[in-house]
Image (cartoon, rainbow, N blue to C red):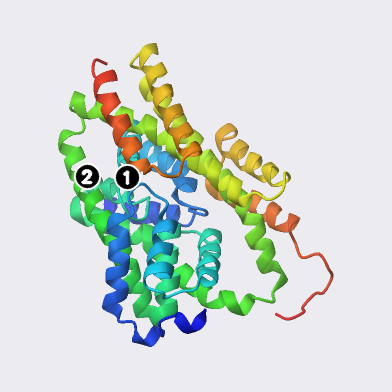
Amino acid sequence: MINQLFALLKVFAYLSLLTVGGGMAAFPELKTLTVDVHHWLTSTQLIHLYSVGQMAPGPNMMMVVSIGERVAGSLGALVVFMAFFLPTAVLTFAVGRLWNRLEGWPWRNAIQRGLAPVAIGLFMAGSITMGKGVITDILALGSVAVCTAVAIAVSVFATLIVTHRINPAFLILGGALIGLFAFRSG
Amino acid sequence: MNDTLKISRDIKLSQIFSAFLLIGATSFGGGVAAYLRASLVARHRWLTDAAFVNFLAISQTLPGLNATNMAVLVGDHLRGAPGAVAAMAGICLPGALLMFAVGMIYGHHGDQPAVTAMLHGASAAAVGLIFATGVQLGQKTLERLGDLVFVALAIIGINVFHLSVLYVLFGVGALAIWWYRPKTGRKGSSQ
């Protein structure tokens, strides 16, 4: 138990420092460490929890708490929460106070400017990792299921690109309802 | 603009906590930045728009989620370290409790066929959502065509060569920062 808690602490503290430009950047490493290295959950379970997490309010990587709960109950959830959110909070607190004093430092702008496209790249890489995982899961259900899944993903994508007025949480809920009928038999 | 702002010593820690708690409980579907702006700038008048944008830029550059980084920066700005703790606790609490409950329920019922089917559907929709978010972030952030090189390098490093995110972050990050390095040779000026 203590070993598991320590492993959770190590993994999620490390992951927290990779979340440049958002939680998605850490997704490929999250999958490697929790699924392939520690076997805390399967790839499918990770994707499912991540997807439910997209509907939850607040910081969008709060799904890590549910991994902690799976591995080591309430204590596991607490350890993961602290490990994942505390290091970056302390770092942000420190850098935030320094930031304005760095106003005239020429590299400040270079760092900000340079990391922006890298953050987008990491976000897209995380999205691709997640997309591949979903395709793998649904391939097992047959080709009709794959077509349905692609149709769901493309409709959500197109809807969100076209309009900002719809809350994405409803679209994910809609996907779940379609899934209830389309993916049941598998 | 500044004179319409609240003086920060008049803002109670409990007010900071409850404002962020409300954001943490209602910001469904991501895009927390919009909820933060509506609360902090428009409703409470604790920040100017310019200060908000500045904090958001710092949040996006540093590791950590935008939502929690914003909570720490704004909380500290309003009431120092205790303010940062109050804001952070508020924005995290609702989602954390919810996902804790989801973890428990998923452990008990996650393998039921109906639940699995719904989650497959939700995950297909989530893929559409994250790609849309990626495209929107890119449209907002990428200023030059050359930026796409760094985007591509990160994707290739992770998805083709399966490199660790850490190496890609440091490798491509260093390259990109060097690419945008300060132009002139004014070394050591105004540290």
The C terminus of chain A: image quadrant: top left
Q: Nearer the viewer, residue B149 or B143?
A: B143
Q: Nearer the viewer, residue A152 or A45?
A: A152
Residue furthest to the left in view is B108
Which residue is denoted by mark 1 in the rendering?
A: A53
- Left or right relative to A14: residue B175: right
Residue B70 figure quarter:
bottom left
Secondary structure at numbered mark 2: helix
Residue at (39%, 49%) from the top-left corner? B30
Q: Which mark is residue B89?
A: none
Please say if the residues under marks 1 and 2 sit with CB atoms less than 8 Å apart: yes
Residue at (34%, 79%) from the top-left corner? B82
Residue type at mark 1 is Gly
Q: Position of residue A71 (x, y in %)?
A: 25, 46
Residue B153 figure quarter:
top right
| Mark 2 surroundings within 10 Å by alpha-carbon count, few (fewer than 14), some (14 through 19), many (20 or more) | many
Which residue is denoted by mark 2 in the rendering?
A: B102
The answer to whether residue A81 is above or below residue A138 is below
Q: Position of residue A2 (x, y in %)?
A: 24, 55
Residue at (69%, 74%) from the top-left corner? A105
- Chain letter of the residue carrying label 2: B
